[in-house]
Image (cartoon, rainbow, N blue to C red):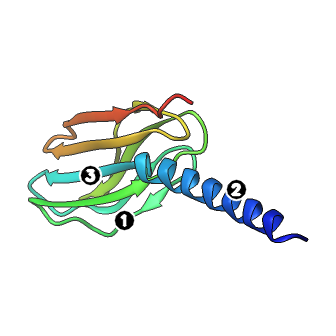
Amino acid sequence: MTERAKYLIGFLVTGIVIGILLVLLRYPGVTIRIDNQTGNQIEDVSILFAGGPVMLVEVANNSKVESRISVTSESSVRIAYSQNGKTITTDDHGYLENGYGGEMTFTLKSDEKYEVVEHIKLPALP
């Protein structure tokens, strides 16, 4: 193989690697935040989505946890947790696909009520 061919192959490989890194850095997944405002500790906390679930530790009252997820197909997000021996699951929220980025915050309140704030970013078009 000539020096010129080696140079061109190295140049192409470098370009491909840089392109992949730029895509991953731009939309590395969706950050899911869980803010426990229930008045009690919650346990067995799970983030449910296509490609999941992600299991988290218990969350003390007035505490927050977060996790980054990457979906592989169309998906929504739900949160499941146990409180006082009862399992509670939120409704489906958000619309995500592979390459989406952003964040979702689930603020869990007393009496199984909650609020969700979504800031989802679509992937860049080619």
For the residues labelled 1 and 2, the Cα–Cα distance comes to 41 Å
**SS state under label 1:** loop
Q: Label 3, on which residue?
A: 33
**Residue corresponding to mark 1:** 56
Q: Residues within 10 Å of mark 2 (few under 14, many from 20)?
A: few
- Front in this rendered view, residue 30 or 14: 14
Q: Point out residue 82 in the picture as x, y percentages from the top left corner.
A: 32, 57
Tally of numbered tags = 3
| Three-letter residue code for mark 1 | Leu
Q: Is residue 30 above or below residue 7?
A: above
Would you call the spot at circle 3 few (<14 residues within 10 Å), some (14-19), or many (20 or more)? some
> Mark 2 belongs to which amino acid?
Leu
Q: Quadrant of residue 64?
A: bottom left
- Pick the residue in front: 77 or 109: 77
Task: Report the residue at 50% width, 44% height from top.
Answer: 49
Looking at the picture, does residue 4 appear above or below residue 126?
below
Name the residue tied to disc 2.
12
Q: Nearer the viewer, residue 7 or 88?
A: 7
Residues packed near mark 1 inside 10 Å, few (<14), some (14 to 19) or many (20 plus): some
- What residue appears at the point 75 percent right and 59 percent down from the top-left corner? 8
* Relative horizontal placement of residue 113, taking residue 80 as reference (left or right): left
Of labels 3 and 1, the one closer to you: 3
The x, y position of residue 27, in whole percent, is 43, 46
Q: What amino acid is at disc 3?
A: Arg
Q: CA distance from mark 3 to mark 2?
A: 39 Å
